[in-house]
Amino acid sequence: MSELASLEKSLQELLLNLDSTACPIILGGGYGLYLRRTILERSGNRTLLDHWPEARSTNDLDLFLRPELLCDSTRLASLKSALDKLGYTPVKGAEHYQFRKDDPDGFISRGIKIDLLTGPRSSFDGTGLKVDERRVRPNPSVKVHAHPTDEAITLDQHLQEVNFQIGEDGKSANKSVYLPHPFTYSLMKLFALRDQVDDRAKGNGSHHALDLYSIIAMMTESEWKQAKKMASANADSKIGREASRIVFELFDSITSQGLLVMRANPYCSDQLQLSEFIDLIRELFQ
């Protein structure tokens, strides 16, 4: 849990130095899931499944930038200023959309990494921005880019606002970050699993498979209804059709490849309701 505590501290430091009104941040990835988990545990709200995997450690903060921020790059100035002030430096080969610094508390030996991402490349059609599969480049440049996520077609829909009361030097500030809807999370994790399921060097995407279980398991009844509407609205899109194909290929039964990969993960316990998970994810992406 020390690694997760370091990430929480790093996120709050970033928010404290960021103009989150001009530059609102959507937090995805493993830490976003962990934050969502802690909120659900405190709320006591009923979820689709009772048993969840143990929270896993991570060293990344995946920060999604809304497309309009990249189209109005002046709004990104405070983000670049905050990264510089806090000692983050660009990652070689991924300059301007990946940043890293050593963990000042020493818990994360790999250092703390921030990945900047955004929605689909199609969001920038007609904007005149330079866009390729690796990055979106704002104009004028503020030395902040973002990696496009083509499957995040519902990135802006049903966001969950999370408020932090952050203190420093005897003062406190109310800062917000947003979490993607579980349906958006599930799309991103499905495509990440697809890309790694046959790659032994990347663990066959076992963390992505287990994250998918967590995403489905932790949905509330109201979120499940929203997710089904979102799935239906996008069923005939290219992303929707591919998501359905992935589910029926990897989660056809308890012995299918996606489940075998999931069960190989050290965080996967015998308590997990795998049969119920299969029924739910197939219903969502029928």
Image (tube, rainbow, N blue to C red):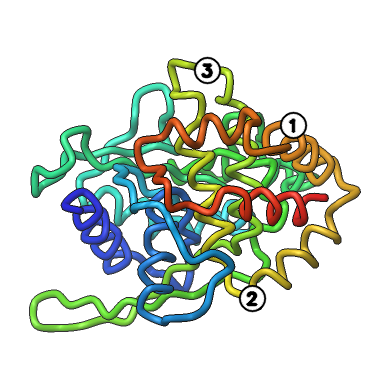
138 or 186, which is in the foreground?
Answer: 186
Image spot of residue 155 (x, y percent) = 64, 58
Question: Mark 3 — residue?
Answer: 199
In the rendered image, residue 44, in percent from the top left (x then y), is placed at: 42, 81
Q: Secondary structure at mark 2?
A: helix
Q: Residue at x 38, y 64 (%)?
A: 35
The answer to which quarter of the image holds residue 227 is bottom right
Secondary structure type for disc 3: loop
Q: Tell me the residue that label 2 is attached to.
A: 221
Q: CA distance from mark 2 to mark 3?
A: 35 Å
3D distance between C-alphas at marks 3 and 1:
16 Å
Which of marks 2 and 1 precedes in the sequence?
2
Q: Position of residue 58 (x, y in %)?
A: 32, 43
Q: Quadrant of residue 135?
A: top right
Task: Name the residue at 37% across, 53% down.
Answer: 31
Going by the numbered disc 1, the residue's amino acid type is Glu
Q: Earlier in the sequence, mark 3 or mark 1?
A: 3
The circle drawn on residue 249 is 1
Question: What type is the residue that disc 3 sits on?
Answer: Asp
124 and 202: which is toward the camera: 202
Within the image, what quadrant is residue 59 found in? top left
Report if the CB atoms under discs 1 and 2 are less than 8 Å apart. Answer: no
